[in-house]
Image: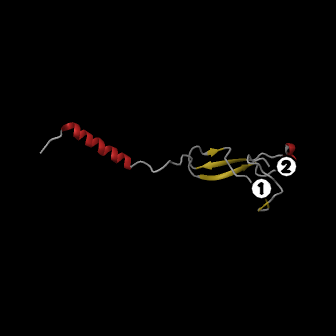
Amino acid sequence: MKSYGLPFSCFLLFLAAAIALACGSPAGPRNTTGILKSVSISPASADAQNYPLGLVQFTATGQYTTAPFQVTPLTATWGACYQGSATNGVSVSSNGVA
């Protein structure tokens, strides 16, 4: 039987370790912001008559399960409703100005 020696044994050990580590790597990127628990809007309600030029800036804040626990401003898709139904009586910009 032919002996290959220490260098070949080290190579096989390295190859086995590389294969074992590759099999345990994650399939994709990890979620670093956790799970969104809640969203709050500030101000909760507003009367445009009480604001300069009748424009109200709304800001969304997200509460997450992991750090950063609070994100302000939270990117949001804005819309308006009146008594639970969509309305065209108010327009809202993509930045939350109504």
Q: Are marks 1 and 2 in contact (CB under 8 Å)?
A: no
Residue 44 placed where, x, y %?
76, 51
Q: In this view of the protein, which residue sits in the foreground, 15 or 83?
A: 15
Residue 6: x and y, percent? Answer: 20, 37
Query: Mark 1, mark 2: which one is toward the viewer?
Result: 1
Secondary structure of the residue carrying tag 1 is: loop
Residue lying at 79% horizontally and 62% vertically, measured from the top left: 83
Q: Is residue 89 left or right of residue 1?
A: right
Which quadrant of the rendered structure holds the N terminus?
A: top left
Where does the image place residue 45, in percent across and percent down from the top left?
A: 79, 52
Residue sitting farthest toward the front: 2
- Report the residue that reaches farthest toward the left: 1
Q: Is residue 72 left or right of residue 22?
A: right
Q: Nearer the viewer, residue 32 or 7?
A: 7
Residue for point 67% across, 52% down: 39
Which element carries disc 2, helix, strand or loop?
Answer: helix
What amino acid type is highlighted by mark number 1?
A: Ala
What residue did someone put label 2 on? Answer: 48
- The kind of residue on which mark 2 rests is Ala
The residue that label 1 is drawn on is 80
